[in-house]
Image (cartoon, grey):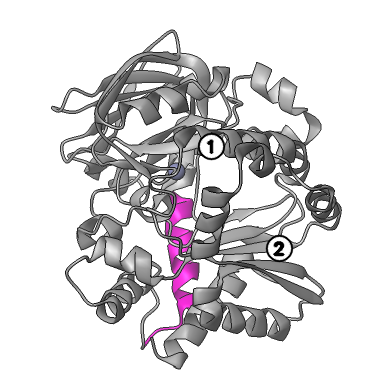
Amino acid sequence: MNKTMLKKYARLIVRVGANVQRGSRVVVYADVERADLAAEVVRDAYRCGASHVAVEWSHDEITRMHYTHRMTDVMTEIPRWEKEKMKDMAERLPCRIYIESSDPDLLRGISQEKIRAVRAVRVKTFKPYRDQMDNRHAWTIAAAPSKAWAKKIFPDLTPGNAVEKLWDAILKSVHVSADTDPVKEWEKINDAFKAKCDWLNKNAFTAMEYTSSNGTNFSVELIPGVLWMGGGEAFLNGHFFNPNLPTEEIFTSPKAGAASGTLVSTKPLSYSGQLIENFSITFAQGKAVSWTAEQGKEMLDQLLGMDEGAKMLGELALVPKTSPINQSGILFYNTLFDENASCHVALGSGFTNLYPGFEHLTRAELTERGINDSLIHVDFMIGADDLTVTGIRADGTRVKVFEHGDWAESMLAEL
Ligand code: ZN
């Protein structure tokens, strides 16, 4: 990756992703293997006037060593300094920039029980801080290749070539190219997202129906007034940022406990270093009641068994099959990309900020109103090539939203 492109990408992450402002405090999370990009991000954050930029380094091989050699009771003991650090963050609310590059197989072969235990303790311990920070600090997740990740995607290439090829795919997916200014490009992209969101919100659908020939036949109710959102988002104070780079989805949180029918997966789900493949989940009275998987059934059992909310949905997302990520034909083994290849739903926690007036309500009140709560939020893809999605208005009128896996022409004509 040449330096000019690296700088362009860093600018996109800092200015469009987190939208770092004069006086912002920033924390960058990166693997040492991508110190080159991390350094450019730090440089650009200071250029934007950040008052303090910190970097939290990770190293895949060392992370794996911890999992291999530490006993579960040691792994699940969270040191006091780590909690203090989270507490400090919840008070200072820095912009958080995640540079994702980890090997999807990082924890392959490590005891599932250990992984589950560590995950459960960490999620539980940090949830109060996360809830406190939710909707109050800007954050963004972007990706960069590591050798291991690139080799997983392109096993036949040399590590160097695989990394270059993954760089190309990543930069293409976030619309960074040699001859355009990505910051300007993203202004246009965010405008296009806004037009579609406005259309969905204006229609005020009370339910959505999904059908495709692979066996998906599903309906779910929506909570009146809850928004559809996509692209960038803004806080109440007006700070606009793009939490995911890339992003192709427009999403909402459906009403927890109001889904029925079957959803059939159309892409493998990579979770905790394991693949769950060719699976389907059937819902009744809003909850997953039965499921099958050709591969990774045990992992799916574990996921759905995490807590009460894990069996309900927290997200519905619309992504056209013409999405550049889908067109690339690459399976990235990473949700940031794979979720933007196709329509999906998420098991678990919903998005509280989609509920109008959320800032005056507690998490419990929002849960009561139908925004699902859970320790997990896990996306899986259901976007078949012949997927039809129909919106149903309060008066019973049916409006085509998606046909043949893409935005319906009648819908696009109204934008
Ligand atoms: Zn999503």
* Mark nearer the viewer, 1 or 2: 1
Which of 185/46 is in front? 46
The amino acid type of the residue labelled 2 equals Cys
The residue where tag 2 is placed is: 95
x and y percentages locating residue 206 in the rendered image: 46, 21
Mark sitting earlier along the chain (1/2) = 2
Which secondary structure class fits the magenta region best? helix
The quadrant of the rendered image in which ligand 1 is seen is top left
Please tell me which residue is depicted at 58% across the width and 24% down the height of the picture. Answer: 372
Image coordinates for residue 365, horizontal then vertical, percent: 73, 21
Front one among 240 and 380: 380
**Badge number at residue 332:** none
Q: Amino acid at mark 1?
A: Lys
* Residue 384, horizontal then vertical, whole percent: 20, 38
- Residue 104 lies, with reference to residue 345, above or below; the image says below
Relative to 156, is 226 above or below? Answer: above
Q: Is residue 284 left or right of residue 165?
A: right
**Does residue 285 sit above or below 249 in this rendering?**
above
